[in-house]
Image (cartoon, rainbow, N blue to C red):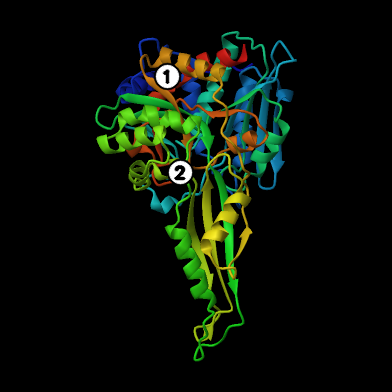
Amino acid sequence: MRATPPVSAALSVLLTLAAPATAAGPAEKAHPMAEEQALELAKQAIALRSVDGPGNQTPQVAALFKAALVAGGFADADVTITPVDDTAYLIARWHGSDSALKPLVLSGHMDVVAARPSDWQRDPFTPIVENGYLYGRGATDMKFDAALALASLIELKRQGYRPRRDIIIEFSGDEETRMKTSSIIADQLQHAEMVINIDGGGGAVDEATGKPVYFTWQGAEKTYADFELTVTNPGGHSSAPRKDNAIVQLAQALANIGRYRFTPEVNPVSRSYFEKAAAYEGPAIAAAMRAFAANPADPKAIETLASDPAHVGQIGTTCVATMVSGGHAVNALPQRATANINCRIFPGHKPAEIMAELARVAGDPAVSFKDVTEGSVANDASPVRPDFVKAVEAAMAQVYPGLAVFPAQASGASDSMWFRYHHVPSYGASPVFIKGSDDFSHGLNERVPISNIRPAISYYLLLIPALSK
């Protein structure tokens, strides 16, 4: 086994200087070897351009992670890398003492969205620590998170921890695009006891003070869907217009859909979020959140939340036109017009149900609908399991005493979708805290406060044993 080098003086200084940004509680402990390894792994992973397409270096990220796990005490045979198209996925197993128990899974991904260096202030694939932040593509989504989880598992091995149930850590290779490897992994691990998705959840930080405000774990997410709308007719010469015009018919259908609002609704996860997160909002939004949690048919609350971009996606299914194409010549009546409607479907509803509702709203039988969704499946909210809730609340209480902890529902999609499809409970529970103004995931100049390193590792060293004993 190759020993991890001791924490450098430079890192100790950086963590000390950065600490006020997300100051942890008095129970926070230093784990110098794990802290050093987390930062170095994150930097090495960011330097690898794991972007879909030619030159994809996701397999090299997998090799980097495997080398760290094997050096940290995992058997080589227990860490597998499987190539898929131009990418790869990794699955590593830490055997527990009771093989009859279902495994605990830690889930993440290694790929990142594309980044054009000429648009960035710093090269996106040259990691740099500056003013307490780690910059680079993947800093927040999600190579930093991956490094924290890996370093924490290795630290548990270093400390001599022995899990009762198997612990599996897995990383998909195309979560940002096709999610083919995400589906494959979930198929293989569909008998897991529980999944902790380190690519979801997280902590909010006060913009003015830099102090942690609350922590949310993700218990549900909306289903992604794309529907293609098509109108066709014979067309003809533009000098002889007819009542039936494919572009006009499609436009009228899109206008009807644009004005439509799906029935607002709540589930146990979103209701709890509205009840508890209201305390951190302004008076108008807070009142609307509480009223909506009590009565999701409250018209005033609906209007207030629907007008707020931060909350419109939380109150029900949303569908929006994202692409349109029509006609074949500037001097001819259109023979064909098409549009794409992108939907984020509230948990508990199937895409076919939503597509049928959209067809009724369009109000024109000449408009045909087709589900053209790729890389997505319907999924329901995960159950609010007491063992998970107790474990995450206890870990947060040790690291951030007195901090509010409550569930949230994501409007976007993650690898949790594939596990929930197999009825495996999956919870986003990343311990990274960040200001809203610092969140540049998928955007320019992505960065994350390195002050997260120490408390995040302390959190994992409490959470993972609590769920694997």
- In this image, 159 relative to 10: left or right? right
What residue lies at 51% left-to-right and 13% top-to-bottom?
462
Per the image, the residue denoted by label 1 is 455
CA distance for labels 2 and 1: 38 Å
Residue 92: image location, x then y, percent: 67, 26
How many residues crowd around disc 1 within 10 Å: few (fewer than 14), some, or many (20 or more)? many
Q: Which mark is residue 220?
A: none
Tell me the tag on residue 264.
Answer: 2
Q: Residue at x 50, y 23 (%)?
A: 37
- 207 up-or-down from 78: above or below: below
Name which residue type carries label 1. Pro
**Picture quadrant where residue 68 is located:** top right
In this view, the residue in front, 396 or 453, is 396
Is residue 240 positioned above or below 62 on the image? Answer: below
Indicate the position of residue 176 as horizontal and vertical percent values: 55, 45
Name which quarter of the figure residue 442 lies in. Answer: top left
Residue found farthest to the bottom? 239
**Which amino acid does the dot numbered 2 rest on?**
Pro
- Which type of secondary structure does the marked residue at label 2 adopt? loop
Where is residue 339 shown, x and y percent of the image?
Answer: 53, 65
Outermost residue to the top: 160
Residue 278's image quarter?
top left
- Does any portion of residue 346 appear in the rendered image? yes
Question: Above or below — where is 332 with respect to 291?
Answer: below
Mark 2 or mark 1, which has the lower sequence index?
A: 2
Q: Secondary structure at mark 1?
A: helix
